[in-house]
Image (cartoon, rainbow, N blue to C red):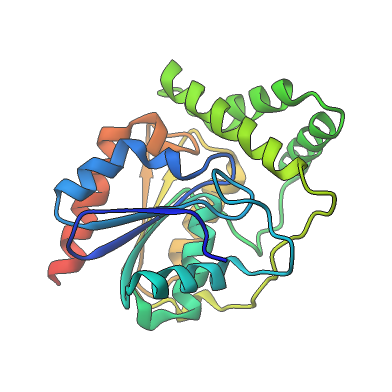
Amino acid sequence: MTITHEVAGTGPAVLLLHSSVCDRRMWDGQWDALREAGYRVVRCDFRGFGETPCADAPYSNLTDLEELLDELGIDRVSLVGASFGGNVAAQFAALRPERVHSLTLLCPGSSTHEPSAELVELGEREVDLVESGRLDEAVELMVDTWLGPDADEAAKAKVRLMQRHAYEVQLAPEEEIHPTEIEVDLRNAVAPALVFGGRHDVDDFRRIAADTAAVLPAGEYRELPWAGHLPALERPAEVAELLISHLAEVWKA
């Protein structure tokens, strides 16, 4: 199975990986700018998000990404990942360092982070709302939690649309199949890595962003003073400029 994806432009390859409250549409605000800046831009939906259905057999997100790159004939790529997608990007860079030219991580997640009591409680509230069929309330909980103060009504509407769709897709199968975890050491991810954290993000993710930058051999951490957890939606044009600036540096090096 090949996960749903879009490709535009020509030039060095850039793959955009979405958050778990979104799908590939979260990159609408950066898509044209990256293409016009001279990149071959790819964005995809992980399984259970957007137009990619849930898995019906064991799978790995990392294997899915490698198969996607193979299908597109991309040997080396710059990965841009948000939250969950940032975690997948860092893991892939550690698993296949020869295929990753650079990393740009926006408020990345982590498979090894021990969640705080507050984050555990948030997850339990979400699960309770979803399992009791109160999807609208669950969606609003996610909008209120993950978008920072600069998010406008258009950003909130987009998250509502994507998160609601994800719930509906993920509730459809009779059996839930979780991805297979592949053990990786992030110290093997040697590509230049710029990691952004948001000052208004949940404390857990602020720590994860700083810790991830410290572990990555070529990692650099920057805090966005205006950002929550989804800066690509909160200030789309500014994030496009940040991405293009970092990509220009690493592709000319």
What percent of the width, then of the height, locates residue 220?
A: 34, 61
What percent of the width, then of the height, locates residue 129?
A: 81, 29
In the rendered image, the quadrant that contains the C terminus is bottom left
Counting labels gives: 0
Instruction: Give the image quarter of residue 121.
Output: top right
**Relative depth, front residue between 167 and 101:** 167
Taking the image as shown, residue 88 lies to the left or right of residue 122, namely left
Taking the image as shown, residue 147 lies to the left or right of residue 31, namely right
**Relative depth, front residue between 10 and 203:** 10
Above or below for 154 versus 162: above
Please indicate, yes or no, whether residue 152 appears anywhere in the rendered image.
no
Taking the image as shown, residue 203 lies to the left or right of residue 224, namely right
**Relative depth, front residue between 197 and 79:** 79
What percent of the width, then of the height, locates residue 9?
A: 21, 54
Instruction: Give the image quarter of residue 30.
Output: top left
Picture residue at 43% right of the left edge, 54% below the top: 5
What percent of the width, then of the height, locates residue 245?
A: 19, 52
Picture residue at 79% right of the left edge, 32% below the top: 130
In the rendered image, the quadrant that contains the N terminus is bottom right
Above or below for 215 versus 127: below
